[in-house]
Image (cartoon, rainbow, N blue to C red):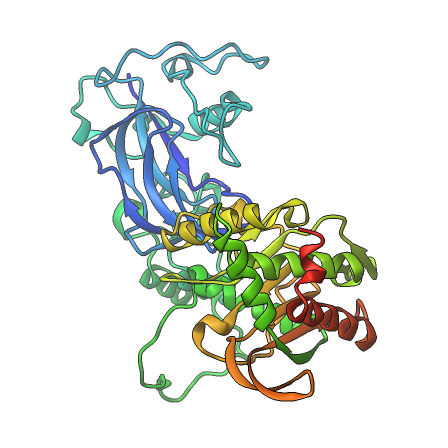
Amino acid sequence: MAQVLEFKLPDLGEGLTEAEIVRWLVAVGDVVAVDQPVVEVETAKAMVEVPCPYSGVVTARYGEEGTELPVGAPLLTVAVGGTGEPAPAAVPAAPEKSTGDAESAVSSEYSGNVLVGYGTAGPAARRRRVRQAAPAAARVPAAAPASAVAPVPVAVPASAPASVQQGPVPVISPLVRKLARDGGLDLRQVRGSGPEGLILRADVELALATAPDHRAPASAPVPSAPSVAPAGERIPLRGVRGAVADKLSRSRTEIPDATCWVDADATELMAARAAMNAAGGPKISLLALLARICVHALDRFPELNSTVDTAAREIVRLPDVHLGFAAQTPRGLVVPVVKDAGKRTAESLTEEFGRLTEAARQSALTPADLTGGTFTLNNYGVFGVDGSTPIVNHPEAAMLGVGRIIPKPWVHRGELAVRQVVQLSLTFDHRVCDGGTAGGFLRYVADCVEQPAVLLRTV
């Protein structure tokens, strides 16, 4: 006998609550093994291949490519324990009493490739709950072909009242959920007319129209004519673009930021870098030298390597510098983080910047690569611009912006000369420090750019 198990979108960690299906890696009827990737999803932080914790035959998939699913929504169902796969071992004994023959038919294999929400920590209890909820119709004879195995039913049985529906509500569209929520409708009382019992917008509208208790309040305004949406292309704010929009909006809402800037003569820094690279050994990037400058400036002005705990009304000064840097990718702007930047040499920083930049271009950054920053370095000079007023990368307290380095007239040793000039800008959270501290930090950075010997003593 085969048992049909439902695999839900697991918690991918780092506070992520949803993911978009980019590409299915399996089809209905395919045989999957434990930990085999079954779908590629895009979160607000990275592209992730999701492994399945069960082995068996895929009986149903939920969501087309391009669909956004919340964590906990069904991804697919798998028939396990049938003759179409290797004979499974019995489930290890649990402290609770046995739940019957159906439980002994389920494979004891479970995922060792742990995502939050399933894995090696305790699969028996999780799967027991699914098996108890599965109706008898979900048990399929072992002789049935893979294509005939039915997915776990999610619609309410005809003989049962709608209020007793168990398991996940078969809704994909956030619009449908909002429509039901605004109308005060419990989606567990709605029968879905879509594939596999999927609840569609028409189902919710019909339920609202026929159930007096769930009709919209009388005070709700009723438009006299359909509203006309503005013309133009509509681009959903989701994935990386949506995450950036949310973070920037939160930064502007919560952080009282201010910006100061200064021009600096970078001629000597450029010459020092050229000399270091000419001496042989691994090449040193300009970004790595600027990172070294930031690290030592933060050592002198630790107020800017901090965050604000708004609930406790406290400033938290952070002991280590984890340096984020802005990187433009085909998927949008991301901010990879160089961990323990204060403990790295210029060579190590160059190597790590290179690794993270390449991973960003390949959409291969992990959530861990994109979180944990304490200060951000933004080299917008690569776009050919001189200056900017960066938005602080919440929940950090400051960001240093670096413009392009170009020849400009400059007074050098009392004489007018053409020098390599760069504009540096610092945007900071005014709650953590005042202008004196911010100005001192920025002036120290400019001094290191103009006199690299100050920096080279610490390299």
Residue 151, how many percent across, how many down? Answer: 29, 35
Residue 223, how many percent across, how many down? Answer: 42, 86
Residue 152 shows up from this direction: no
Q: Nearer the viewer, residue 59 or 121?
A: 121
Residue 161, how many percent across, how many down? Answer: 43, 43
Q: Nearer the viewer, residue 229 or 310?
A: 310
Q: Nearer the viewer, residue 128 or 262?
A: 262
Q: How many marks?
A: 0
Q: Nearer the viewer, residue 437 or 370?
A: 437
Determine the residue positioned at 81% across, 60% down. Answer: 315
Assign the N terminus to one quadrant of the image: top left
Residue 409, how many percent across, how many down? Answer: 56, 88
Occupied quadrant, residue 36:
top left
Looking at the image, is 451 positioned above or below residue 341? below
Residue 119 shows up from this direction: yes
Determine the residue positioned at 54% across, 45% down. Answer: 368
Classify residue 96 as left or right of residue 173.
Answer: right
Looking at the image, is 151 positioned above or below residue 122? below
Determine the residue positioned at 23% across, 19% down. Answer: 141
Classify residue 328 as left or right of residue 117.
Answer: left
